[in-house]
Amino acid sequence: QKEVEQDPGPLSVPEGAIVSLNCTYSNSAFQYFMWYRQYSRKGPELLMYTYSSGNKEDGRFTAQVDKSSKYISLFIRDSQPSDSATYLCAMGGNYGGSQGNLIFGKGTKLSVKP
Amino acid sequence: EAQVTQNPRYLITVTGKKLTVTCSQNMNHEYMSWYRQDPGLGLRQIYYSMNVEVTDKGDVPEGYKVSRKEKRNFPLILESPSPNQTSLYFCASSFLGHGNSPLHFGNGTRLTVT
């Protein structure tokens, strides 16, 4: 079983739709959960950062972490064509060394159609 | 502006011809890392550095070398490139290098080895 699983998509939605992106993981030591957005021909950029379980909201974006189910989600409300990108989940723990490196999902490609 | 700068952005070379991809960050970050991104495989870590003169292998280090002589610079060296190293490469840095420290990425170097 891979440490982090993410459906690669592609996911195509109409403008204004609510988008749900998800990752599952197997390592119960993960404490920090992040979502990165990657536009074509660009490097990933941090979108959301969450510690432990719970929700975090930033504008149209909401990140959820359910540690009991080892499941994280990113919701995008009122999606816009400018949200079209690849979304990568990433997670890690505070245990340093090579094991402290972030582990990335493979990314979900999202397309929002006008 | 806080950033990670990689050069060159695009590189086409032939098998066996040594090359170096440069990476520089202006955020005084301790931690730097190199990734390669391939379709269907996601981001895979090549090498990382926790501080000056401290480097360690990631998941796919074969065929690559790195050095960290200065805090801001972390070049990636391919001594004898081969076609299977054709990929999109990203340099990244973070303040702490633990799982709780978000990574800042460069805009990538697309390498083609013929």
Image: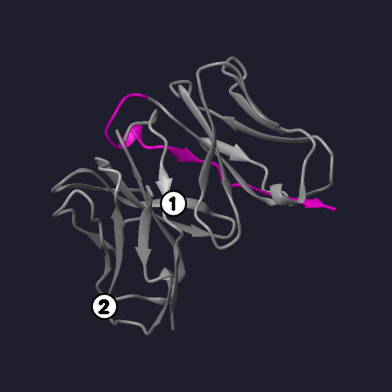
Identify residue type, mark 1.
Arg
Does the magenta portion include A107?
yes
Q: CA distance from mark 1 to mark 2?
A: 22 Å
Q: Position of residue B84 (x, y in %)?
A: 43, 71
| Foreground pick, A32 / A23 | A32
The secondary element bearing badge 2 is classed as loop
- Which residues lie in the magenta part? A94-114
Is any atom of residue A20 visible in this view? yes
Across and down, in percent, residue B54 comes to 16, 45
User: Do callouts 1 and 2 point to residues on the same chain?
Assistant: yes
Q: Which residue is label 2 attached to?
A: B18
Decide if residue A1 is in sight here.
no
Q: Is residue A76 left or right of residue B81?
A: right
**Chain under numbered label 1:** B
- Tell which circle, 1 or 2, labels the residue nearer the N-terminal end: 2
Compared to A100, does A69 lie above or below? above
What subunit carries mark 2? B
Vertical placement of B6 versus B31: above or below? Answer: below
Q: Residue B70 placed where, x, y %? A: 15, 52
The N terminus of chain A is located in which quarter? top right
Given contact means CB atoms under 8 Å apart, are the residues at marks 1 and 2 in contact? no
What amino acid type should be assigned to the residue bearing mark 2?
Answer: Lys
What kind of element bears circle 1? Answer: strand
Residue at which label 1 appears: B44
Q: Residue furthest front?
A: B1
Residue pictured at 29% horizontal, 64% vertical: B22
Q: Residue at x 80, y 35 (%)?
A: A18
Disc sitting over residue A82 in the figure: none
Residue at horizontal 34 percent and vertical 33 percent from the top: A99
